[in-house]
Amino acid sequence: MTELKSTLIRGGTVVLGQTVSQQDVLIRGEQIAAVGNLSGFKAAVTMDAGGLLVLPGAVDVHVHYNDPFMSTVSVHDYYSGTLAAAHGGVTTVIDFSNQKHGQPLIDTLAYKREEAGNLPLVDWGIHPCIVDATPETLDQIPLVVAAGAPSIKCYMTYRQDGLYISAEELKPIAARLHGAGGMLLVHAEDDEIITRNISELVSAGLTSYTYHTKAKPPEAEDKAISQCIDVSRETGCRVFIVHLSSATGAELVGMGRAQGVDILAETCTHYLVFTGEMLEREDGLKWICSPPIRDQENQDRLWAALRDGRVSLVSSDDAAYPWEAKLYGLNRFDLVPNGLPGIEVRLSLLYSEGVAKGRLSLPRFVEAVASTPAQLFGLAPQKGTLTPGADADIVLFDPQVKWVMGLESLHMATDYAAYDGIEVTGKILQVYSRGELIVDRDQCLAAKGRGRYLRRILDPSLRAL
């Protein structure tokens, strides 16, 4: 029998659940074999992790690869997108696949499998997106869940892009999902409020980038979140609010959960780093996304909600559109493709802005970027933890290094950066995926196609804070 390759990561500060302590980590083959004082162990390769944090590989459950939207397509495919993920310490991603109008929901899985081909560098999964709430689509929900894609997304806005699903249509979708063991993901913004506001603002000639936040106020988000809470309460289905930006929305989620409603939410890196002041800049279209980036008070409240668990986790919502496409909306906020490239920056920025600045504890940081998304999205116990038996997805992170983030220091495929000039505390040095060293400093060692498609099964007993 061939002996499995072994690697011993010695003397690092290991974050394992709520415990932060100096320990050794033994990798054997693709899995973590042991954690503790392993001074008596020998391995084929020994890494000195003295002074470094040893973290589980990050899990990003919200990325948009090859995404057609607002007359363009995102530049991250399954090679460039997973390359950026790997450099960002992300060892698992889950992408979205929109149903094509008039086509079976189950086909969404085939679309993405074909797109991915032999390109992915890290492990990956799929969220199907429903755009036709027909009886035929509802009948296929159990098939999609059984095929390993149990988290299905719906949009409560973007009617003009053919994505809109009404609050009433959400109820039968959620009921079918609940019965099949799935979870409903919702882009929660009220389309009626937004459509009216955009029409009034554009008619009045108020089209500069700052009016994006006027068109999509917190009230639009909060109304949709309240409707989602009602959907969850009526159907029993777990509902997950994606890219929550409204602090009042986070409070609504918290109150719903206190009442026993199975409602959860994520926020995104950009909501925790930027404020609406960025839209006042000449290049403010870089920061147009939906829901919008809001003011400083709202951001401070979001940090508090993340800290106490009303917001369960942080994703990137990586939507990397080319600069040429962003310029479709030059001085017209309503025509800018919505989204920011962010797959690579999430772990480093959340450490720098969260842990290093005292907003988050180290265990809560790891929960937000790795363990909680793995648990909620059917990836545990293999992903998101350093527990023996889990996949050896590991990040070695230097918490002392300071560096400046920008286009030249990142590996995302966009021809512009939304994170230029930010001084970051902490840097990723090495990344392991299933025991294989795939990133060593600035060098990617991963071969195309090594990433595996992940069939997921949700465990409703696993709950966030």
Image (cartoon, rainbow, N blue to C red):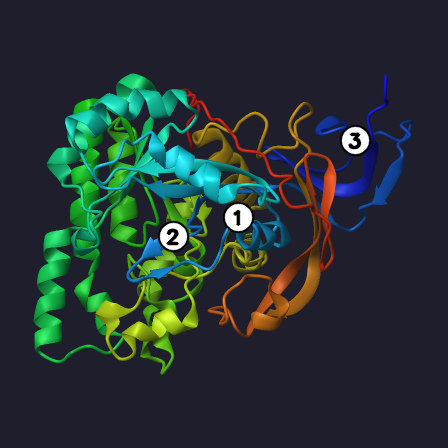
At label 3, which amino acid type do we have? Answer: Leu
* In front of the other: 412 or 229: 412
Give the CA separation, mark 3 to mark 2.
39 Å
Disc 1 vs disc 3: which is toward the camera? 1
At label 1, which amino acid type do we have? Answer: Tyr
Which residue in the protein does label 1 denote?
Answer: 78
Which residue in the protein does label 3 denote?
Answer: 26
Q: Residue at x 42, y 32 (%)?
A: 464
Q: Which mark is residue 456?
A: none
Furthest toward the bottom, the residue is 282
Label 2: how many Cα within 10 Å (few below 14, some 14–19, many 20+): many
Residues tagged 1 and 2 counted as in contact (Cβ below 8 A): no
Label 1: how many Cα within 10 Å (few below 14, some 14–19, many 20+): many
> Sequence-wise, which precedes: disc 1 or disc 3?
3
Which quarter of the rendered picture does the C terminus lie within? top left
At label 2, which amino acid type do we have? Answer: Asp
* In front of the other: 15 or 445: 445
**Local SS, label 2:** loop
Residue 98 at what x, y percent from top left? Answer: 32, 42
Which residue in the protein does label 2 denote?
Answer: 67
